[in-house]
Image (cartoon, rainbow, N blue to C red):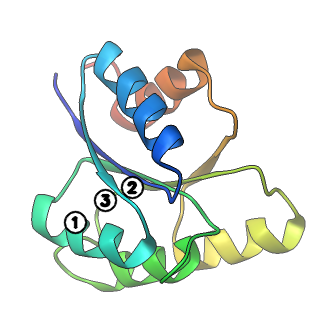
Amino acid sequence: MLKTILIVDDSAMIRRIVSQLIQRLGHQPFTAENGLQGYEMAAEVRPDMIIMDIEMPVMDGFEATWRIKSDQRTAHIPVMFFTALGSEENIKQAKEAGCIGFLNKPICKEELSQAILDIFGTD
């Protein structure tokens, strides 16, 4: 079943690569280049899942996720952080913001596919 997945990352190259992987997995990608745009897109598009970078200009991933999880329109959307950062402080802050897990940079198709399966099951 087709899922919509919002990719929020300040790197155009990463947005393009992850979008291509998502399309190859049979889903519909949408992109945003910073946390504020990501929050606004989440409210507009209401994706089935969000992949959120942490370090971005304008608004970081922690703040954007906190806003998404605080908004009744988007609170139900699962958010996975997508980052090279993995300190205990980052993990704690991410969980407090409402994320459900982490994807590591650089991403591979298998890891992304498994994360999507973990969230949506096999439908």
State yes or no: discs 2 and 3 in contact (Cβ < 8 Å). yes
Asked if disc 1 and disc 3 are in contact, CB closer than 8 Å, the reply is: no
Cα–Cα gap, marks 2 and 1: 14 Å
- Residue type at tag 3: Ile
Q: Position of residue 78 (x, y in %)?
A: 39, 55
Task: Tell me where residue 29 appears, x and y as whole percent.
Answer: 27, 38
Q: Residues within 10 Å of mark 1 (few under 14, many from 20)?
A: some
| Mark number, residue 41 | 1
Quarter of the rendering containing residue 73: bottom left
**Residue 93's image quarter?**
bottom right
For the point 42% across and 22% down, which residue is it? Answer: 21
Nearer the observer, 38 or 48: 38
Residue in the image at 48% along x and 83% along y: 58
Q: Is residue 67 left or right of residue 29?
A: right
In the picture of the structure, the residue carrying the numbered disc 3 is 77
Label 3 environment density (alpha carbons within 10 Å; few <14, some 14–19, many ≥20): some
Identified by mark 1, the residue type is Met
Of residues 98 and 44, the one drawn nearer to the viewer in this rendering: 44
The quarter holding residue 104 reads top right
Q: Amino acid at mark 2?
A: Pro
Mark 3 lies on a secondary structure that is loop
Residue that mark 2 sits on? 78
- State the residue in front, 100 or 89: 89
